[in-house]
Image: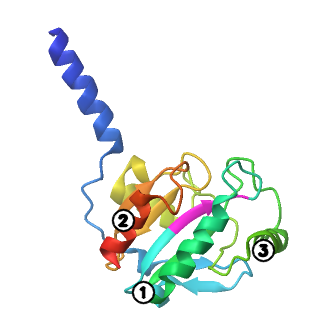
Amino acid sequence: MSKYKKIIYIIISMLSFFAKGNAEYNKIFYDFKINSIDKNEIDLKKYTGKTILLVNVASNCGFTNQYADLQKIYNKYQEKGLVVIGVPTNQFFQEPENNQKIKEFCEVNFNITFPLTDKYEVIGKDAHPVYLWAKENYGGAAVPKWNFHKILINKEGKIQKTFGSSTKPLSEEIVFEIEKIL
């Protein structure tokens, strides 16, 4: 194999990891249910036609200050149909608290009013079904690599785009995508 063919093969292999899956979407986001932080079932059908920013969150993470920007973006676009949903997880060992303490932390420190869910796994075979669905339909880019990974769901209930932990909620990239699909 020539040097150039090897380079092209490596580039194609790398891009395939980040590329969207060729999704058939046997289910859409709104077909799922998830428990709220208060342990009440949330039928995601109630958000049908809304744009969703799904974010796995943690209280003891270097990105925890993103809670403030998540609340700001929620406040700014809520009336236009954006819903931010925070999914606490301890899979990265930065959310050891119970739901009561997580909720209190978010309300006291960041005045969070967007929906928070029960604490769930977001990676691996035991991940909440919505995260398994995201991986199946969008590929590796939908799998959180760390806390504050963001999955943007469009009004059709399909994944529009994903953003890594270091991409701030008020970044031009996220705001552009949200405004494009609201």
Q: Determine which quarter of the picture holds residue 4.
A: top left
Residue toward you, 95 or 111: 111
* Residue matched to label 1: 80
Where residue 164 sits: x, y (%)? 49, 50
The N terminus, quarter of image: top left
* Residue matched to label 3: 103
Q: Visible in this render: residue 33?
A: no
Q: How far apart are marks 2 and 1 (CA)?
A: 14 Å
* Residue matched to label 2: 176
Q: Which residue is drawn at 62% across and 52% down?
A: 147
Find out whether residue 55 is within the magenta segment: yes
The C terminus, quarter of image: bottom left
Find out whether residue 26 is within the magenta segment: no
Q: Are dots 2 and 1 in contact, CB under 8 Å?
A: no
Q: Which residue is drawn at 47% across and 58% down?
A: 171
Mark 2, secondary structure of its residue: helix
Q: How far apart are marks 3 and 1 (CA)?
A: 25 Å
Mark 3, secondary structure of its residue: helix
Q: Which residue is drawn at 31% across and 78% down?
A: 156
Coloration mode: rainbow
Query: What's the mark number on residue 8?
Result: none
Look at label 3 and name its amino acid.
Lys
The residues colored magenta run 54-58
Q: Is residue 53 above or below residue 97?
A: below
Mark 1 closeness class: few <14, some 14–19, many ≥20 residues within 10 Å: few
Where residue 29 sits: x, y (%)? 42, 74
Look at label 1 and name its amino acid.
Lys
Where residue 172 sits: x, y (%)? 42, 59
Mark 2 and mark 1 lie on one chain; the one further toward the N terminus is: 1
Mark 1, secondary structure of its residue: helix
Horizontally, residue 128 falls left or right of residue 116, namely: left
Q: How far apart are marks 2 and 3 (CA)?
A: 29 Å
